[in-house]
Image: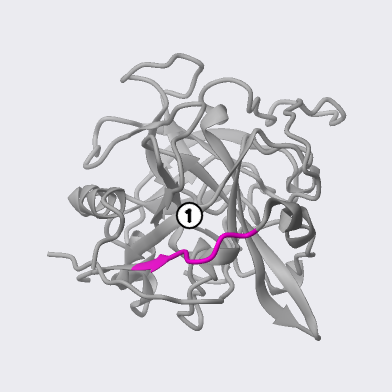
Amino acid sequence: MSRILRATGTAGCCIFLLIANRALSEPISAHRAAEDSKAGLMSLLSQPLDASTAQGFATKPATSSEQRVHLAQANTDLSLIGNPAIAPLKWAGLLVNVDAFEKGGKKFNVNCTGQFITEKVVLTAAHCIQDDDTGTFFDINKMYFLLQYQYENYSQVYRPICASRFDSWRSSGDVKYQWDFALILMDRPSVTGNYNVAVDWKGKFTGATATGYPGAILGGEVIEKAHGDLVTPSDVPNEYGLKHGQKRFTQGSSGGAWVANFGNKVDADHNVVISISSIGVNKYPGLTFGPYFTSDFSRLLEYVSNGCPH
């Protein structure tokens, strides 16, 4: 059986994990307190991100308050570019952690990918809300979710009420990566809808489409998609690999959904989230690893949906 814990962290730093080589759990949660003024939002989001510190996948924040969404057409290869105006990518966005860490006297932001999986709950990676090295939570009072983000534009800004993940994410060894997912309760419902989610889906799907904001593609300003085959690692339980072949699908794509039956149909059989991007391994470019959702995922979802109660 897995445990869910709670915490009231204030600052931290993390991103999509990129490693050189390759339990029982309780949810831990953090709650937001003070409300930031809208006037100060864009000055906060304009803080830089230091890519040299990235151990995983994260990119840079929004720097404009405009509420428009437009499509990228400047890249010569448009095969990876996603359209955030239609399903399913209209349910995704950029998760921004402002002033996540300090280096050389400067403060830096850390960004990840997130997406609505219920009316008010956003799914991302555990290392996108908590520092993998120190265990310190990002300051939830400086966390923003920019729905349908693209080229410094977005349709809505959401603020978290609480965020939680399982405590086994902080365990030692590679086994912890099966717990690299987190859920965030937002301050109001999604205006565009949400993904479906599958748990204990083994044997039902053979492939999926990875989604996210990798910084190596168009500077992380556009949501991307890359389809691939699912593979089963032999060394970590409840973890899958997605062999999409895109070497640049790294920093910034952490927390991005792996979507089975990806397409613009909105029904129970399409656009099913089966995992998220968690880690990459240097010697296997184009291969991303993510957690396999079991009944523990459903338990965490219920806990967060209820406001992360004590």
Front residue (pair 173, 262): 262
Position of 233 relative to 28 (above/below): above
Query: Among all residues in the image, which is located at the extreme left?
Result: 1
Label 1 sits on residue: 160
Position of 249 relative to 271 (above/below): below
Residue 144: image location, x then y, percent: 59, 53
Position of 96 relative to 244 (above/below): below
Front residue (pair 180, 241): 180
Instruction: Report if residue 180 is visible in the image.
Output: no
Residue 257: image location, x then y, percent: 47, 41
Q: Main secondary structure of the magenta part?
A: loop
Mark 1 secondary-structure assignment: strand
Instruction: Report if residue 150 is visible in the image.
Output: yes
* Residues shaded magenta: 29-36
Asked if the magenta segment contains residue 174, the reply would be: no
Q: Residue at x 46, y 47 (%)?
A: 187
Residue 270: image location, x then y, percent: 38, 21
Q: Residue at x 43, y 31 (%)?
A: 194
Asked if the magenta segment contains residue 32, the reply would be: yes
Task: Please say which color scheme the image uses.
Answer: one colour
Q: Residues within 10 Å of mark 1 (few under 14, many from 20)?
A: many
Q: Quadrant of residue 97?
A: bottom right
The three-letter amino acid code for the residue at tag 1 is: Pro
Residue 172: image location, x then y, percent: 36, 80
